[in-house]
Amino acid sequence: DTFTYNSVFPNGDVGIGTTSPEATLEVTSSTKVVGVNEANLLISDSSTAAANLGGSLGFGANSSYGEVTIAKVGGYRENATDTSLNSYLAFETRSGSAAVSEKMRIDSTGTITLSGDKTIDTANTLRINAGGGTLYLDSSADIKLRTGGTTEAVTIAATGALQLNAYGSGTFTGTSAYKLSVDSSGNVIETAI
C-alpha cells in the first residue's frame, strides 16, 4: 500500500504521544516537573564536549532570500570540561541582514547578561551593571548607585532617607562650616556657611 502524508495526517498536524494534536506539532508525555533532568522534547548536539555547544531551536520567516532563521533560543555548555555540565540559556535575534546574534544570556549562576556587557545579578541582591556603573538593591532593601568600584555614590535607604557619599569638588560631608547646595546645573555642591 502507498500512503500519502494527508492520508496519515488528514489535517496536516503531527502528534507524538497524542492522537489528536491541536497544533502543527504537539509532543505530549507524562508530567515533567521543574528540577528533573527530563523534558518533553530534547534538542541536543552530538559533538565532542566544547564551550558554546548545545541544542537550539530556531524561528524562521520567508524572505526574498528564501526561508531564513530570524531568532534562536539555545542551551549551551559554559566550558569544554566533559564532567562539568554548567550551562547557559541564550536568546538570539537578528537585525537587518546581519546573522542572528546573542542579545540575552542566563548563566549557570542565574546572572542575566544583556547585549554582552550589561548584567543583572540575582545572587542575594538585584544588581544591574552597565559600563562602569552599578545600580543594586541589597538585602536591607536599600537602593544603591555605584559609579565605579565598591563605594556607593548615592544610597536611598528603605526608610526613604537619601545619602550622598560623594558630592562637589571637595571632601566635605556637611559640617558646621559647610552646607550642601544645588548649583544652576543641578549638581550637589558644598558651600561655606
Image (tube, rainbow, N blue to C red):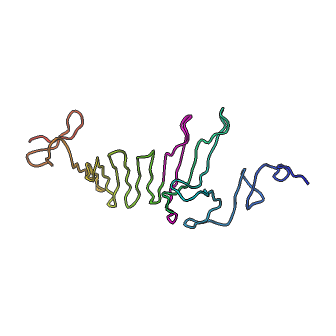
Which is more toward the observer, 92 or 77?
77
What are the residue bounds of the magenta stretch? 82-105
Q: Is residue 134 left or right of residue 36?
A: left
- Can residue 97 be found in the magenta stretch? yes
Q: Is residue 29 left or right of residue 161?
A: right
Q: Is residue 83 left or right of residue 55?
A: left
Residue 103 horizontal/vertical position (percent) = 49, 45
Quarter occupied by residue 184:
top left
Question: Which residue is at a point 21% across and 49% down the rendered structure image?
Answer: 165
Which is more toward the observer, 165 or 84?
84
Residue 189 horizontal/vertical position (percent) = 18, 40
Residue 60 horizontal/vertical position (percent) = 64, 42
Question: Which residue is at a point 61% across and 47% down the rendered structure image?
Answer: 58
Question: Which residue is at a point 63% across and 39% down the rendered structure image?
Answer: 68
Quarter occupied by residue 121:
bottom left
Q: Split into 4 quadrants, where in the image is the N terminus?
A: bottom right
Which is more toward the observer, 160 or 36?
36
Question: Which residue is at a point 56% across and 52% down the rendered structure image?
Answer: 74
Which is more toward the observer, 14 or 67?
67
